[in-house]
Amino acid sequence: MKPLVRLEESHTADGIWELWRRDGELSLLLDGTPVANTRLCGSEEEMARLALSPMARAGKPLVIIAGLGLGCGALSALSVLPRITARFIIAEPVKEIVSWCRKHCDFTSSLWQDERVSVENESAAELCRARKASVHAILMRHTHARCRLAQADAQAYFEALKGGGLLAILLAEPDKRLEGVLRRVGFDCSVSQLPAAAKGKRTLLHTLVLARRGRYIPFAERMQRS
Protein backbone atom coordinates (compact mmCIF):
# COMPACT_ATOMS: atom_id res chain seq x y z
CA MET A 1 0.00 0.00 0.00
CA LYS A 2 1.25 3.47 -0.90
CA PRO A 3 2.13 5.63 2.14
CA LEU A 4 -0.23 8.41 3.24
CA VAL A 5 1.73 11.65 3.63
CA ARG A 6 0.56 14.82 5.35
CA LEU A 7 1.79 17.74 3.27
CA GLU A 8 0.34 20.69 5.16
CA GLU A 9 -1.51 21.62 8.35
CA SER A 10 -3.07 24.87 9.55
CA HIS A 11 -5.06 25.79 12.68
CA THR A 12 -7.83 28.29 11.90
CA ALA A 13 -11.02 29.56 13.53
CA ASP A 14 -12.94 26.90 11.54
CA GLY A 15 -10.76 24.07 12.82
CA ILE A 16 -7.66 22.18 11.71
CA TRP A 17 -7.13 22.06 7.96
CA GLU A 18 -4.85 19.35 6.52
CA LEU A 19 -3.65 18.39 3.07
CA TRP A 20 -2.71 14.74 2.50
CA ARG A 21 -1.30 12.83 -0.46
CA ARG A 22 -1.30 9.15 -1.35
CA ASP A 23 0.10 7.93 -4.68
CA GLY A 24 -0.64 11.24 -6.44
CA GLU A 25 -4.14 11.58 -4.96
CA LEU A 26 -4.67 14.70 -2.84
CA SER A 27 -7.21 15.06 -0.02
CA LEU A 28 -8.20 18.21 1.87
CA LEU A 29 -9.55 17.65 5.38
CA LEU A 30 -11.14 19.82 8.06
CA ASP A 31 -10.92 18.36 11.57
CA GLY A 32 -10.36 14.96 10.01
CA THR A 33 -13.40 15.12 7.73
CA PRO A 34 -12.79 15.00 3.95
CA VAL A 35 -13.65 18.28 2.20
CA ALA A 36 -12.17 17.69 -1.27
CA ASN A 37 -10.40 14.89 -3.11
CA THR A 38 -8.79 14.95 -6.54
CA ARG A 39 -10.25 11.52 -7.37
CA LEU A 40 -13.80 12.56 -6.51
CA CYS A 41 -14.08 15.66 -8.64
CA GLY A 42 -16.48 14.39 -11.29
CA SER A 43 -19.49 15.91 -9.53
CA GLU A 44 -17.80 19.32 -9.38
CA GLU A 45 -17.11 19.19 -13.11
CA GLU A 46 -20.71 18.26 -13.88
CA MET A 47 -22.02 20.96 -11.51
CA ALA A 48 -20.06 23.58 -13.45
CA ARG A 49 -21.42 22.30 -16.75
CA LEU A 50 -25.04 22.25 -15.63
CA ALA A 51 -24.90 25.63 -13.88
CA LEU A 52 -22.86 27.59 -16.42
CA SER A 53 -23.90 26.22 -19.81
CA PRO A 54 -27.09 28.37 -19.75
CA MET A 55 -24.84 31.45 -19.31
CA ALA A 56 -22.72 30.71 -22.39
CA ARG A 57 -24.33 33.49 -24.44
CA ALA A 58 -24.18 36.14 -21.71
CA GLY A 59 -22.05 39.13 -22.73
CA LYS A 60 -19.99 39.45 -19.55
CA PRO A 61 -20.82 36.53 -17.27
CA LEU A 62 -19.76 36.90 -13.64
CA VAL A 63 -19.31 33.70 -11.62
CA ILE A 64 -18.59 33.42 -7.89
CA ILE A 65 -16.99 30.16 -6.75
CA ALA A 66 -17.63 29.64 -3.05
CA GLY A 67 -14.58 27.83 -1.70
CA LEU A 68 -11.51 26.79 -3.69
CA GLY A 69 -11.19 23.23 -2.45
CA LEU A 70 -8.50 21.66 -4.62
CA GLY A 71 -9.36 23.78 -7.65
CA CYS A 72 -11.34 21.21 -9.64
CA GLY A 73 -14.60 23.18 -9.70
CA ALA A 74 -12.87 26.43 -10.63
CA LEU A 75 -11.00 24.79 -13.52
CA SER A 76 -14.23 23.25 -14.81
CA ALA A 77 -15.95 26.64 -14.68
CA LEU A 78 -13.22 28.16 -16.86
CA SER A 79 -13.61 25.43 -19.46
CA VAL A 80 -17.41 25.79 -19.60
CA LEU A 81 -17.18 29.59 -20.05
CA PRO A 82 -14.07 30.12 -22.18
CA ARG A 83 -15.05 33.57 -23.45
CA ILE A 84 -12.55 36.29 -22.66
CA THR A 85 -15.16 38.64 -21.17
CA ALA A 86 -16.14 36.20 -18.40
CA ARG A 87 -15.04 36.92 -14.82
CA PHE A 88 -14.52 34.38 -12.05
CA ILE A 89 -14.19 35.32 -8.39
CA ILE A 90 -12.99 32.60 -6.02
CA ALA A 91 -14.22 33.34 -2.50
CA GLU A 92 -11.80 31.53 -0.17
CA PRO A 93 -11.49 32.88 3.39
CA VAL A 94 -8.70 30.43 4.30
CA LYS A 95 -5.55 31.86 2.71
CA GLU A 96 -3.57 28.69 3.41
CA ILE A 97 -5.80 26.67 1.07
CA VAL A 98 -4.96 29.00 -1.81
CA SER A 99 -1.23 28.67 -1.05
CA TRP A 100 -1.44 24.88 -0.79
CA CYS A 101 -3.31 24.63 -4.07
CA ARG A 102 -0.69 26.73 -5.84
CA LYS A 103 2.15 24.69 -4.32
CA HIS A 104 0.85 21.12 -4.56
CA CYS A 105 -1.89 21.02 -7.22
CA ASP A 106 0.19 21.24 -10.38
CA PHE A 107 -2.88 20.66 -12.55
CA THR A 108 -4.26 24.06 -11.44
CA SER A 109 -1.39 26.11 -12.89
CA SER A 110 -3.61 27.48 -15.69
CA LEU A 111 -6.04 28.75 -13.05
CA TRP A 112 -3.49 31.20 -11.64
CA GLN A 113 -2.35 32.33 -15.07
CA ASP A 114 -5.87 33.21 -16.26
CA GLU A 115 -6.43 36.98 -16.05
CA ARG A 116 -10.19 36.43 -15.72
CA VAL A 117 -9.71 34.86 -12.29
CA SER A 118 -9.40 36.71 -8.98
CA VAL A 119 -9.29 35.43 -5.40
CA GLU A 120 -11.00 37.17 -2.47
CA ASN A 121 -10.20 36.12 1.10
CA GLU A 122 -13.77 36.39 2.35
CA SER A 123 -16.89 34.28 2.21
CA ALA A 124 -19.14 34.13 -0.83
CA ALA A 125 -22.02 35.52 1.24
CA GLU A 126 -19.96 38.61 2.16
CA LEU A 127 -19.04 39.12 -1.50
CA CYS A 128 -22.66 38.78 -2.57
CA ARG A 129 -23.89 41.37 -0.09
CA ALA A 130 -21.84 43.96 -1.99
CA ARG A 131 -23.27 42.90 -5.37
CA LYS A 132 -26.94 43.37 -6.20
CA ALA A 133 -28.39 41.70 -9.31
CA SER A 134 -24.95 41.46 -10.95
CA VAL A 135 -23.92 37.78 -10.66
CA HIS A 136 -24.81 35.13 -13.22
CA ALA A 137 -23.95 32.03 -11.18
CA ILE A 138 -22.66 30.97 -7.77
CA LEU A 139 -21.00 27.56 -7.39
CA MET A 140 -20.82 26.10 -3.89
CA ARG A 141 -19.55 22.72 -2.75
CA HIS A 142 -20.46 21.12 0.58
CA THR A 143 -19.66 17.50 -0.13
CA HIS A 144 -18.11 17.05 3.33
CA ALA A 145 -21.28 17.81 5.29
CA ARG A 146 -24.81 19.10 5.04
CA CYS A 147 -25.07 22.73 4.07
CA ARG A 148 -26.18 24.67 7.12
CA LEU A 149 -27.08 27.72 5.08
CA ALA A 150 -28.55 30.58 7.10
CA GLN A 151 -31.60 32.26 5.59
CA ALA A 152 -29.83 35.64 5.65
CA ASP A 153 -27.01 34.21 3.51
CA ALA A 154 -29.51 32.57 1.16
CA GLN A 155 -31.16 35.97 0.78
CA ALA A 156 -27.78 37.54 -0.02
CA TYR A 157 -27.20 34.99 -2.78
CA PHE A 158 -30.69 35.54 -4.18
CA GLU A 159 -30.29 39.32 -4.29
CA ALA A 160 -26.82 39.11 -5.86
CA LEU A 161 -28.02 37.02 -8.80
CA LYS A 162 -29.39 38.42 -12.02
CA GLY A 163 -32.79 37.22 -13.22
CA GLY A 164 -32.35 33.62 -14.31
CA GLY A 165 -29.11 33.35 -12.33
CA LEU A 166 -28.25 30.05 -10.67
CA LEU A 167 -27.00 29.08 -7.24
CA ALA A 168 -25.54 25.56 -7.49
CA ILE A 169 -24.84 23.67 -4.26
CA LEU A 170 -23.15 20.27 -4.18
CA LEU A 171 -23.95 18.04 -1.18
CA ALA A 172 -22.96 14.64 0.15
CA GLU A 173 -26.64 13.68 0.40
CA PRO A 174 -30.13 15.17 -0.09
CA ASP A 175 -31.01 17.96 2.32
CA LYS A 176 -34.70 18.93 2.54
CA ARG A 177 -33.93 21.66 5.08
CA LEU A 178 -31.66 23.41 2.61
CA GLU A 179 -34.27 23.21 -0.13
CA GLY A 180 -36.81 24.77 2.24
CA VAL A 181 -34.47 27.67 3.09
CA LEU A 182 -33.83 28.37 -0.59
CA ARG A 183 -37.51 28.29 -1.52
CA ARG A 184 -38.44 30.63 1.34
CA VAL A 185 -36.22 33.40 -0.07
CA GLY A 186 -37.66 32.98 -3.56
CA PHE A 187 -35.57 30.37 -5.39
CA ASP A 188 -37.02 27.71 -7.70
CA CYS A 189 -35.15 24.49 -6.90
CA SER A 190 -34.37 21.26 -8.70
CA VAL A 191 -32.39 18.32 -7.31
CA SER A 192 -30.34 15.68 -9.13
CA GLN A 193 -27.79 12.98 -8.34
CA LEU A 194 -24.28 13.10 -9.84
CA PRO A 195 -21.48 10.49 -9.78
CA ALA A 196 -18.75 11.71 -7.44
CA ALA A 197 -15.94 10.30 -9.58
CA ALA A 198 -15.52 11.02 -13.26
CA LYS A 199 -13.79 7.68 -13.91
CA GLY A 200 -13.69 4.17 -12.50
CA LYS A 201 -16.46 2.91 -10.23
CA ARG A 202 -19.24 5.50 -10.09
CA THR A 203 -21.28 4.09 -7.20
CA LEU A 204 -20.76 7.09 -4.90
CA LEU A 205 -23.29 9.82 -5.66
CA HIS A 206 -23.42 13.49 -4.67
CA THR A 207 -26.56 15.62 -4.62
CA LEU A 208 -26.76 18.78 -6.71
CA VAL A 209 -29.26 21.48 -5.83
CA LEU A 210 -29.82 24.03 -8.59
CA ALA A 211 -31.62 27.12 -7.29
CA ARG A 212 -32.75 29.61 -9.92
CA ARG A 213 -33.77 33.24 -9.48
CA GLY A 214 -36.63 33.53 -11.95
CA ARG A 215 -36.12 33.17 -15.70
CA TYR A 216 -33.08 34.30 -17.66
CA ILE A 217 -34.01 36.94 -20.25
CA PRO A 218 -31.39 37.45 -23.00
CA PHE A 219 -30.30 41.02 -23.73
CA ALA A 220 -31.93 41.01 -27.19
CA GLU A 221 -35.28 40.01 -25.70
CA ARG A 222 -35.01 42.69 -23.01
CA MET A 223 -34.39 45.30 -25.72
CA GLN A 224 -37.48 44.17 -27.64
CA ARG A 225 -39.59 44.60 -24.52
CA SER A 226 -38.32 48.10 -23.77
Image: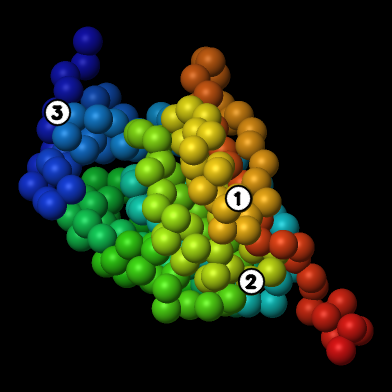
Q: Quadrant of residue 142?
A: top left
Q: Quadrant of residue 60?
A: bottom right
Judge whether 209 appears above or below 223 on screen: above
Q: Quadrant of the N terminus?
A: top left
- Distance from Cα at disc 1 to Cα at disc 3: 43 Å
Judge whether 10 appears above or below 95 on screen: above
Which residue is label 3 attached to?
Answer: 5
Dot 1, crowdedness within 10 Å: few (<14), some or many (≥20)? some
Taking the spot 58% from the left edge, 68% from the top edge, the residue there is: 161
Do the CB atoms of the residues marked 1 and 3 lie less than 8 Å apart?
no
Which residue is label 2 attached to?
Answer: 162
Taking the spot 39% from the left edge, 53% from the top edge, the residue there is: 150
Judge whether 18 appears above or below 77 on screen: above
Secondary element at image label 3 = strand
Which residue is label 1 attached to?
Answer: 183
**Type of residue at label 2?**
Lys
Q: Residue 53, labelled with which disc?
A: none
Q: Quadrant of the C terminus?
A: bottom right
The answer to which of 176 and 225 lies nearer the viewer is 176
Secondary element at image label 2 = strand
Dot 3, crowdedness within 10 Å: few (<14), some or many (≥20)? few
**Type of residue at label 1?**
Arg
**Type of residue at label 3?**
Val
